[in-house]
Amino acid sequence: MVLVVNYIKRDLEQTVRENLDMPEMIAILRPRQSGKTTLMRPIFGTLLAPLSGTS
């Protein structure tokens, strides 16, 4: 389980979620410490939840 505290939802998160079913790869390219991992943690949690049996 991943806990994200004080997470501010970004517009880009919705765009990534909308494109997850497409066969192409999604790449998030930004400078170091610009929030790439913070952006992806909630998405990873959603994707991995069905595999672990949690929501």
Image (cartoon, grey):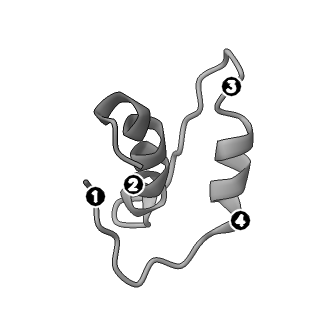
The residue most toward the front is 53
- Tell me if label 1 and label 2 are in contact, CB under 8 Å: yes
Residue highlighted by disc 3: 21
Q: What's the CA distance linking mark 4 and mark 2?
A: 15 Å
Secondary structure type for disc 2: helix
- Tell me if label 3 and label 2 are in contact, CB under 8 Å: no
Q: Earlier in the sequence, mark 3 or mark 1?
A: 1
Residue 27 higher or lower than 36, as above or below: above
Q: What's the CA distance linking mark 1 and mark 4?
A: 21 Å
Image location of residue 3, percent across then percent down: 29, 67
Residue highlighted by disc 1: 2
Residue highlighted by disc 2: 41
Look at 39% across and 40% down and name the residue there. Answer: 49
Asked whether, in this view, residue 17 is left or right of residue 1, the answer is right
**Type of amino acid under label 3:** Asp
- Tell me if label 3 and label 4 are in contact, CB under 8 Å: no
